[in-house]
Image (cartoon, rainbow, N blue to C red):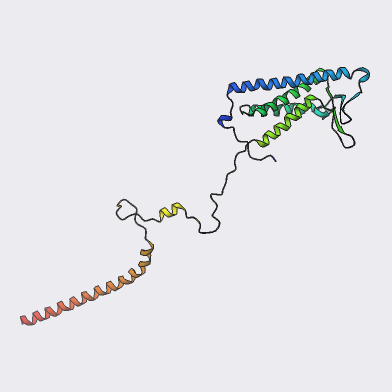
Amino acid sequence: MISHRSIKPPAPNETLSPEQQVRWDVIIGAIGIGVILLDQISKAIVMSHFSGARRFDVVPIFGSVLSLIFVQNNGAAFSLFEGLGVVYIFIAAAVGVIGYLYLRFRPRNHPWLKVTFGLILGGAIGNVIDRVRLGYVVDFIHFQIPGHFDWPVFNIADSSIVIGMLSLIAIFVLLPRESEPSFADDAPPTGGTPARDPLERTSSVAPRASDPTGPAAKPTSQSVAAGPRARSVAPTARSAGTKSVATATRVSVKSASKARRKHR
């Protein structure tokens, strides 16, 4: 199944230089020309053989499974859309898609990908030549399994297009994809004590008393625990101080009374 993730861009060592891209353009053109020549030569031989009285002859190649037969195809590949004007829309759309894919993946260093474009290009041009020159496409290869399967008659250009398209799909499926983001690191551990946040550990450490520039020390667990005891001791200290002042006042009053008596 084709992944929904986008195709990963090629690494720097997998990217062709402009000179290498031009070289591959020439190779793709040569492959396309080879397919065109093979297709047109085979069609010329077939038309010369199936002419006149032999127009409807059937030449067996492998019994009744594979044979040669002359068919004038007014549709697209494998007689698709035969007799319909939509065939031209289909051809134009196919050429547009292949052209876009070729330009997009032109810098990628993938030899078989380049070969597939050559096969598709040569097959498409081979059939277009027939349509422009004859008004129809010459098909002559017939494959069937009698009583079970009967494939539409096709030609070498059709075979080249199909091989190229199947290879192109396989390449796109196998090309490396962008990795999906993983949230495994953010998930809590299964079992045991969950790991504490490093920031939490840092914030719980009180600054040293010797650092005059540090922030005020936060109350620790010991100071918090000692807080009630300190608050309970404070009223006792205040009451003791009050008693000592009262005692000193009484002593001073007695001393003044004795001094007045002596003076009398």
| Residue lying at 21% horizontally and 76% vertically, measured from the top left | 246
Q: Is there any visible trace of residue 89 in the rendered image?
A: no
Q: Is residue 20 left or right of residue 224?
A: right
Instruction: Give the x, y percent position of residue 36.
Output: 76, 20
| Residue lying at 9% horizontally and 79% vertically, measured from the top left | 259
Q: How many marks?
A: 0
Q: Given the current orientation, which residue lies at the most extreme right position?
A: 53
Quadrant placement of the C terminus: bottom left
Instruction: Please determine whether, in this image, residue 37 is positioned above or below residue 210.
Output: above
Instruction: Please determine whether, in this image, residue 93 is positioned above or below residue 34.
Output: below
| Residue lying at 37% horizontally and 64% vertically, measured from the top left | 222
Q: Given the current orientation, which residue lies at the most extreme front position?
A: 62
Instruction: Give the x, y percent position of residue 241.
Output: 24, 73
| Residue lying at 80% horizontally and 18% vertically, measured from the top left | 41
Task: Specify the quadrant of the image occupied by residue 64.
Answer: top right
Residue nearest the viewer, comparing 232 with 31: 31
Task: Specify the quadrant of the image occupied by residue 258.
Answer: bottom left
Q: Is there any visible trace of residue 53 in the rendered image?
A: yes
Quadrant placement of the N terminus: top right
Q: Is residue 80 left or right of residue 120?
A: right
Q: Is residue 262 left or right of residue 50?
A: left
Residue nearest the viewer, comparing 104 with 126: 126
Instruction: Give the x, y percent position of residue 80.
Output: 82, 30
Task: Specify the quadrant of the image occupied by residue 30.
Answer: top right
Instruction: Give the x, y percent position of residue 166.
Output: 73, 32
Instruction: Please determine whether, in this image, residue 61 is positioned above or below residue 196.
Output: above
